[in-house]
Image: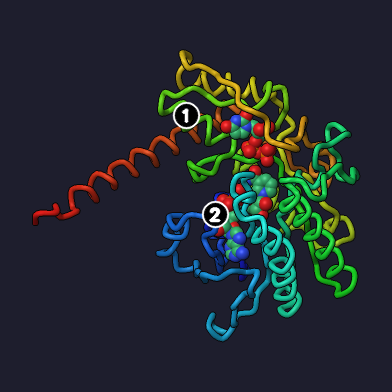
Amino acid sequence: MNILLTGSAGFLGSHLTERLLADGHTVIGVDNYISGQRRNTALFMEHPNFKFIQADVSEGIPYKAAAFEGRSLDYVLHFASPASPPHYQQFPIETLMVGAQGTQNALELAHAHGASFLLASTSEVYGDPQVHPQPESYWGHVNPNGLRSCYDEAKRYAEAITFAYHRHHGVDTRVIRIFNTYGPRMRPDDGRVVTNLVMQALAGQPLTVYGDGQQTRSFQYATDLVNGIVALMNLPESQAVHAPVNLGNPDEYTILQFAQVIRELIDPGLEIIHQPLPADDPRQRKPNISRARELLGWSPGVDLRAGLTRTVESLRQQTEQAARTAQVDAEQVPSASA
Ligand code: NAD
Ligand code: UDP
């Protein structure tokens, strides 16, 4: 297939690109690097089936078939959006725009090409949930104007417009609700709990737990998510494939337990310190994945310690490489007297 992927330079975009290329597809990545990494584009630039367009998808998606051997698109995957709470709170308007205009531009493109469309939605559409674990039938409990609303409401709108294009224009749409996902190639400074705690532990610093640490999350390894996405993409069109599908790992941890796992893996001597809980931080989160099991025969297979071990190794290498590059750069800077 000829697949256009928005958000290709992001953490999940890089894993999807890797898998789709390995499966023999052509991938046209689109990104403006607002929260992504150029290194994730560089990984694939030599691949004959990878092309990249630098663009803000909220402004438009400049895919012209003529520039791509006349090929029309078979699939549009819309993953562009800041995803970490510090990132989307730093760019609230851009986050709303990419969930709204960006999603519409991606849907228009799919419609024009007769392509299928897949939206990366999120467990954040459930807000601070009062139903636990969360099934897709739950409508959520969202503060419409709180600190997280730029992300939550953008994704809720993105789901609404996706369903409107399906019902009104007959576009073959699919919606996944992704629960907290981690793995190699996350940005070390993205501010999410996984990278914060791993980077702190690698630096021998205390681990920061917000609030009392009794809030819960369920952590899914990136390749498990990618397997679920590919399974949903490959299902033939039927009424069932259009409904939102939770993709997450139901293995639930309090954040304090999670910090203890990181400490055990990296340095059992580290201190855990508490910092204020951000506003509207969801108290609990765990997916009900019955729909994904039944529809896709999918369930996650990578357990937390195994996934974290690979993630820690990748972040360690990334940090060492950044330090080496900084050292080489420093050696190459001419001295003031030269
Ligand atoms: P990420 O920030 O690493 O990747 C997002 C990418 O989108 C970045 O490369 C960013 O530069 C790009 N982008 C943002 N706005 C853009 C715009 N206007 N035009 C072009 N590119 C733009 O985040 P991620 O964790 O890889 O998340 C990817 C998608 O999955 C997001 O839509 C996010 O909401 C969703 N999601 C992720 C998680 C998770 O745990 N990682 C959970 C739920 C949902
Ligand atoms: N968190 C924490 N310490 C950190 C970063 C985050 O205790 O250094 C908490 C945060 O308050 C939340 C949970 O960890 O309860 C998950 O946060 P993250 O930003 O990864 O994603 P969220 O699920 O909140 O979108």
Is residue 219 in sight in this rendering? Answer: no
Write down which quadrant ligand 1 falls in. bottom right
Q: Residue at x 47, y 33 (%)?
A: 199
Is mark 2 in CB contact (under 8 Å) with mark 1?
no
Q: Position of residue 20 (x, y in %)?
A: 58, 58
Please rate how many residues cluster around mark 2, counting C-alpha atoms within 10 Å: few if below 14, some from 14 to 19, many from 20.
many
Mark 2 or mark 1, which has the lower sequence index? Answer: 2
Front-lying residue, 169 or 46 = 169
Examine the rendered structure and indicate whether residue 97 appears above or below residue 40: below
Instruction: Say if disc 1 is inside 8 Å of ligand 2.
Output: yes
Is 320 drawn above or below residue 145 in the view shown?
above
Residue at which label 2 appears: 35
- Check the image and name the residue furthest to the front: 337
Q: Residue 86 at what x, y percent from top left?
A: 60, 45
> For the view shown, which residue lies furthest in the top direction?
269
In the picture, measured across the screen, residue 310 lies left or right of residue 105, that is left
On screen, residue 216 above or below 98: above
The residue drawn where x is 14% and y is 52% is 335
Q: CA distance from mark 2 to mark 1?
A: 21 Å
Specify whether tag 2 is near ligand 1 (CB below 8 Å). yes
Quadrant containing the N terminus is: bottom right
Q: Nearer the viewer, residue 180 or 101?
A: 101
Q: Secondary structure at mark 1?
A: helix
Would you place residue 167 above or below residue 228 in this image?
A: below
Q: Which mark is residue 200?
A: 1
Q: Amino acid at mark 2?
A: Ser
Three-letter residue code for mark 1 = Gln
Residue 127 % position (x, y): 80, 42
What colour scheme was applied to this rendering of the protein? rainbow
Q: Secondary structure at mark 2?
A: loop
**How many numbered tags mark residues here?**
2
